Image (cartoon, rainbow, N blue to C red):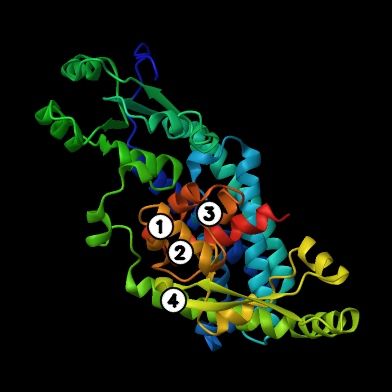
Amino acid sequence: MLDCVLSTPLRSRPRHSHQRVFRIGDMIVVAASFTAAQLLVSRDEFWLSLQVDPWGSLGSLVLVFACVTVCLEVGDPQQWDSVMDRLRQISLALGVGFLIESFLAYSRFTALSPEVMLVGSALCALLLTSWYWIFGIAVPASRAPLKVLLLDADPVFEAVVPSPVFRGRRCEMLGPLKDPNTLGSVIHEHHLDYIVVQEANRELPTALLLELRSAGVAIESAAEFYESALERVSTRHLHPRRFLFGELTPKRQNLAIQAIYSNVVVLIVLTVALPLLLLIMLALKVSAPSQPVFQKQRCAGLNNVPFTLLRFQSRSWLGRWLKRFGLDGLPQLLNVVRGEMSLVGPRPQRLEFAKELAQHIPYYGERLTVRPGLTGWAQIHAPDADALLELEYDLYYTANLSPGFDLRIIIGSLRANR
């Protein structure tokens, strides 16, 4: 384990308020950039349209503002180690805004003109980067590493500390303390962001910990720390009560919302990709007349109810080529439309494998309290991992399922496939 290194005091950092101010600044910059672009390009026409049709004129601005700010919200400022990281996040947000505005323009809905989008994006990139730089100078504590004190020893820390994901969050680990009663003297020397304790430790200085919590220091159990640091659930600390009381199950309203936007997005993709799908089906039939176009697999679905997963067959030379470029899974779009899968979720597992794994791994079946997905949290973080590690990522996803989290996973998938 780690040695206790308590030598350099740090300033107190109200980190949540810093992030709130930073995100508010992001929203102001985005709104100001595209409004200024509209005024620079349209000039008097914009003021006239505001008087004639205010909702139509402001609607396109609101849409692009919402798209860009939501994509910026997906990013975590604690993971931006340089201006280049910030630029990548800004480029991604503006790119999504461009795509959505282009689709709206193609569909003849209200949308900003290409000139306004270009000028607004340029202003946005410049001002958002400047805001990141200015905020770092004005509030240097916002970029300082998190100070985490391990009050006790726990085997999970050996997985947390060397993890590249954890190192990317710029955390400074201290402890574990040999004697928890020395915590008071440590507090006088240091300003901590987190204190991590074991739930089974019955010799905790409870009164002092409660006082620290009231002062803004986060107190977490080893399982909570593992989860927040690595964004996966610790199978070592799993208890039945977490499932019984719904801690690791998704909210029903989030499942309903996911079903709606998954179907809408997939129907749009199917409409655009239908000629390609028909061409592939025809080419597969011509190249291998004796083989079926689709390969069908029985997989475990929502609540472990079986369904038939569709893929293009990969036994012919064309099928192997499709598999190499990841196009063999295109028919799974039909599984989404039929309500058997979702855009985001756990990896679909063949029925016989799912039953076998459920017999050997406790709570394995609980990963399917959501629909299997075309992509997922486990797929982008551990594509070739063992079933136990995959379960940790899947349970974290089921506990945190939301539209924003799904968007983050989809963006991560696009990055991984570049």
- Sequence-wise first label, 3 or 1: 1
Contact between marks 1 and 2 (CB within 8 A): the answer is: yes
Farthest left residue? 207
Q: Nearer the viewer, mark 2 or mark 4?
A: 2
Q: Which mark is residue 378?
A: 3
Q: Residue at x 28, y 59 (%)?
A: 243
The x and y percentages for residue 231 are 44, 46
Q: Nearer the viewer, mark 4 or mark 1?
A: 1
In the image, 392 versus 112, the foreground residue is 392
Q: Residue at x 42, y 61 (%)?
A: 367
- Sequence-wise first label, 2 or 3: 2
Mark pair 2, 3: CA separation: 19 Å
Asked where in the image residue 270 lies, by quadrant, the reply is bottom right
Farthest right residue? 287
| Type of amino acid under label 2 | Lys
The x and y percentages for residue 300 are 49, 71
Mark pair 2, 4: CA separation: 12 Å
Q: Residues within 10 Å of mark 1 (few under 14, many from 20)?
A: few
Q: Which mark is residue 305?
A: 4
Describe residue 241's horizontal placement relative to residue 38 as left or right. left
Describe residue 41's horizontal placement relative to residue 35 as left or right. right
Contact between marks 2 and 4 (CB within 8 A): the answer is: no
Disc 1 marks which residue?
A: 359
Disc 2 marks which residue?
A: 355
Farthest top residue? 7
